[in-house]
Structures are given as structure tokens and as C-alpha cells.
Image (cartoon, helix red, strand yellow):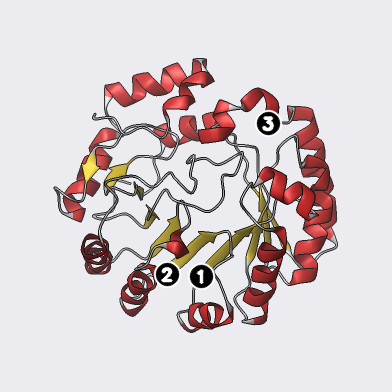
Amino acid sequence: MGDYRAPLFLAWQLTNACRCRCLPCCEESGPDQAWPSELSRDEALKLARDIVSAGIPHVAFGGGEPVAVPWFWEICAILHAGGAGLKIETDGLLLDEAACVRLKEWEAACVQVSIDGASAAVHDRVRPGGSFDGAVAAVRRLAQAGLGPEVVFTPTRLNLADAPAVFDLAARLGARTFVTGPLMRLGRAAAHWKTLAPSESDWQGTAACLEEKARGSRMRLSVYPWDIREEIRVRRESPQAMMLVVPDGRAKLLNALPFAPGDIRRQSLAEAWEAVCRAWKSPKVSAFIDRVLADPKLLKHANECWDV
């Protein structure tokens, strides 16, 4: 990351609010979980313009539900006009035909929709407040618009057996990629780890089944290779040239680490990036990573924002 004057990739959590209260949610989002100090419209549009000025080539929106933020489309328009590629992680429920056409016109690089079961009974159990039918319809609309959507499947004990059938469903809907990986021990998943996390052997068996299916499919399979502790270990040795901006404008190192050394409300984007780069070299950060590697229960602090 020290080779770049700005991140190559900015992950932006526009809000922590979401209509769903998904059991494995990394951010513990929900209908009543908006942060009281989330960026205003003016602050968010300024950040979008600063991203363009800094020449950051890729911006990924998560949350919460980013599409529900009233100024989401204004932000995307600024970024698209400035040449930034757009990635959107969404439940899909607000993506009507007109929205899909707009995203196609803006050449959105990636739109990901979660489908966490092969039936409404399973999907809606894993994603309370969500809609299996709505997610399926959104993927179909995105595919019809020519966007090549990605379907994301989060494995838990509640839905692991459905993974092969969800893969087949995603292929029928016209998805470009099926995205999955080990359950991340963050947010609600961390709080309910013992009841949600599949065994390692069960997960590996499912991953092998998906890889076999992918050999005969035009849809690409993308399996994230690491669990969250391995990612933290790898990133400490070689941090990505990326920055995570959370809903109140603070800049974090990684969603699995509680350190927020930057603040775009008080600093320029360049200053926040420099603070993030310095923090990765901090003995305090390194010592916490050592503790997490020894005791994963400390991941319960991931969504906090600590000074370095």
C-alpha cells in the first residue's frame, strides 16, 4: 500500500441501516441500527468528489443497505462521471427495472445480491426481514439488463445443505459468478458462532461439491480462500491498497479490525489515507492481531472504532 498516494480501492459503508437482520451479518445491521452520526448528504457528496479528485479507480458500497440511502444515486453519478468503477453489495429489493438500466448505463463493474437458501423458508430464516422472491427477481432483472450479477452465498449450519441448489438457481437466473467462502467470525456471526458456524469438514465438503459443479457450468465460482483470522494475518504482512470508510466517515484498516485512524470529517482524503498507512505499521495494531490470532473471541470488537 505504501506505493500509492491514494487507495486503489475504497470500501464505503454508506449506512448501517437495513431492512434485514441477517444472522451472519458482519456489520450487525438492521432496521434500527443506523448510526446517529452517519454522513449527511453534503458530506457524502463531498467525499464522492474527493474520491474522483484522488483518482481512486474502484469504489465498493456496502452497509447496511446502500441503495436505501436517499443520495445513493447522486453519489454513483459523481463517481461514474469521474471514471470510478462501481461495486454494489445489496439485498436487491430496491433494484427495479429502471435502476438496473441505470446501473448498466453507468457500466457498474459488479452488483452482488445475496441468496442464502434454495427456498424462501431457508433464505428468509437466515435473512430475517429479507425476501427470497425479491432477491431472485433482482438477480433476474440484473441479468436481463446485461449486468452479469454475482450471487453471494454465506454458509451457515442453517443453509449449508442448500449450497449446491443455490448454485444451480444462480446459473438459471443468469448470474455471472457464484461467490462464497468460509463464514466470517464478525458481527452477529461472531455473537452466535457456536450455533451458526459449520464444521470445517462440512464446509470443505460443500466447497468441493461446488467446485465439481463449476467444472460443468458457464457461471464462474469464486470461493474466498481464507477465514477471517488468516486474512488478518496475511494483511498484516502485506496490507492491501484499500481503505474502509464506515457510516460516520471514519477510515478503518479492515472490517475485522477495530482501529479507525482516519476521519474524513476532520481530514482530507489524502490525510486519512496516510493515517491508515501509518496505522498498519503500529505496534498497537500488531499486538492486537497477535491476540486475535491466539483468541478469536476478540473479533467481537471488530465493529468498534478505536484510536491508534
Image quarter for residue 160?
Answer: top right
Task: Examine the rendered structure and indicate whether residue 20 appears above or below residue 174.
Answer: above
Residue on which the image places disc 2: 85
Residue on which the image places disc 1: 109
Q: Of the residues tagged 3 and 2, which is closer to the observer? A: 3
Q: Earlier in the sequence, mark 2 or mark 1?
A: 2
Task: Examine the rendered structure and indicate whether residue 12 appears above or below residue 154.
Answer: below
Label disc, if present, on residue 82 of the rendered structure? none
**Coordinates of residue 218 in the picture (x, y in percent):** 78, 68
Rounded to the nearest whole Å, what is the CA distance between mark 3 and mark 2?
A: 34 Å
* Type of the residue with mark 1: Ala
Tell me the element at label 1: loop
Disc 2 vs disc 1: Cβ atoms closer than 8 Å? yes
* Type of the residue with mark 2: Gly
* Type of the residue with mark 3: Leu
Rounded to the nearest whole Å, what is the CA distance between mark 2 and mark 1?
A: 6 Å
Residue ID at (83%, 42%) = 161
Residue ID at (49%, 39%) = 28
Mark 3 residue crowding within 10 angstroms, few (<14) / some (14–19) / many (20+): many
Residue that extends furthest to the front in the rendered view of this protein: 32
**Coordinates of residue 200 in the picture (x, y in percent):** 73, 28
Residue on which the image places disc 3: 196
Rounded to the nearest whole Å, what is the CA distance between mark 3 and mark 1?
A: 32 Å
Q: Earlier in the sequence, mark 3 or mark 2?
A: 2
Q: Earlier in the sequence, mark 3 or mark 1?
A: 1
